[in-house]
Amino acid sequence: MIVVDNITVHAGDFVLRDVSFKLNAGEYGALMGRTGCGKTTLLEAIIGLKQVQGGAIQIGERDVTHERPAARGIGYVPQDGALFSTMTVRDHLAFALEIRRLPKDQIQNRVDELAQWLGIEHLLTRRPFGLSGGERQRVAMGRALSFYPAILLLDEPLSAVDEETRGEMYELLRRVQKQSGVTVLHVTHNAEEAREMADVVFVLRDGKIQKEGA
Amino acid sequence: MKDISTKRVGLTDSVFFLSMGIIGGSYVLLILLLLVADIAYMVQGASWGEVVFENPMVLALAKPEIRYSIMLSLISCTLSAILSLLVAVPIGWLLSRFRFRGRNLLDAILDIPIVLPPLVVGLSLLILFQFWPLTARLPFVGMSLNEFVVYQIPAVILAQFAVAAAFAVRTMKATFDEINPRCEQVALTLGCSRMQSFMRVTLPEAGRGMLTAFTLAWARALGEFGPLLIFAGATRNKTEVLSTTVYLELSIGDLEAAVAVSLIMVFAAVSVLLITRVWGARDVMV
């Protein structure tokens, strides 16, 4: 569950004021809005990359408003994937678990499981260079899901994916959510994508959130 | 009717490329001619046997003081390049990632060693070491930092570092500018502390830039002369490095030896350049 309660965030001259919404556990939420309306700023505040000037953010039962990003337990898939160019796909999937010092066999099992879910077993030894848009997003998603986060935040995950792959990715996102039980907040400016995927749609307009059932 | 066809476009394009090539090529030619002239000067009028076994470079290499200066150059340049990288990485990262009060001032301060005349850098170092606490006698060591550094080997390294580091900082800032800051942020969400995300994600991504910064600092240190002359002196078998050797040989009128040592410097610099290029290229291919 994500509860955003009256938060105020500054990003340069831009201010988001008194923004609130609630996404229940296990739901797939889409956050829509025009380019420049503050979607990414809001997302960064939830992740902990941007300080909030007022209000509170709750993940599950925990108030995380002032916690470091590392402590929030949110899987984040940025728009461009932001893959680590020096690491193999396997390293990406194992990264968060190695940071948590999990035993090697557990890491191996999790990497295999994720690779199978995402259909990237054949890419495990590859580096990001030369991967297609869809493949990059799968890797970024695997990396974000690897440490069993309660929440998965996707920032325009399909913007770099071609039309043909898009359908596959919808399918994949649905399947992954079902298998992992993760709560998803999916930022998009594509209305079709939001309708296709989401249980609930939030629209950010003029600094306010409106909830629309999907 | 007025001719409005575009058939002259092809001609103007080739003229354009030709002039770009000629203007650019003239500089490349100058660089190559400089090297060729040095070599030609050394081998003129000599037989093949003399060229191979008795050329001024071989003769220069046989002199113990020149061997000492080669050794000191290699060691001091490597040390000052390592030190340069050590300060360039944090400064470059901070400048690239954060907008803080005084950032522009800091940026300008870091350019001072680049724009300052080299002699002034040397003189300023010399003067700095006349002040307390650098002149204070250190307990247990029995000498002051001034005595330990000025006109000694540490002065060579410090003078090289003072200028070379500024170039390394510029390179590292540009390197971090090119690395997507999102990667570091993602690492934070994956459970990393700032330090972990820096060490595990940012630094490996900056590998090639670090190699470039190191090479640039090394080459810069090799060519350093003005500050060295003032701050470290030009004492044979003590603070003499290759650039000082060229100066000393010239001052006693031995042009051949000066050219020979210059060529040794060219070989050293080109070797370092080639090694890092090949290494860097291999890194990209993987």
Image (tube, rainbow, N blue to C red):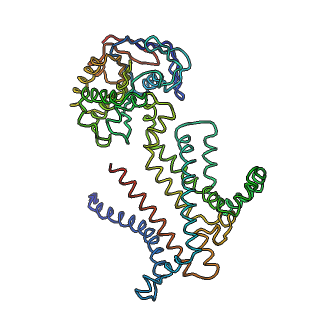
Image-quadrant location for residue A137: top left
| x and y, in percent, of residue A68 in the image | 51, 24
- Whether B150 is drawn above or below B138: the answer is below
- Whether B10 is drawn above or below A140: the answer is below
| Front residue of this view, candidates B39 and A194 | B39
Image-quadrant location for residue B221: bottom right
| Front residue of this view, candidates B1 and A40 | A40
Image-quadrant location for residue A208: top left
Quadrant location of the N terminus of chain B? bottom left
Q: How many marks?
A: 0
Residue at (55%, 66%) from the top-left corner? B71
Tell me if A53 is positioned left or right of B147 in this view: left
| x and y, in percent, of residue B159 in the image | 64, 59
| x and y, in percent, of residue B33 in the image | 45, 75
Residue at (43%, 43%) from the top-left corner? B204
Q: Residue furthest front?
A: B140
Residue at (38%, 66%) from the top-left corner? B21
- Whether B133 is drawn above or below B31: the answer is above
Residue at (32%, 64%) from the top-left corner? B14
| x and y, in percent, of residue B80 in the image | 57, 56
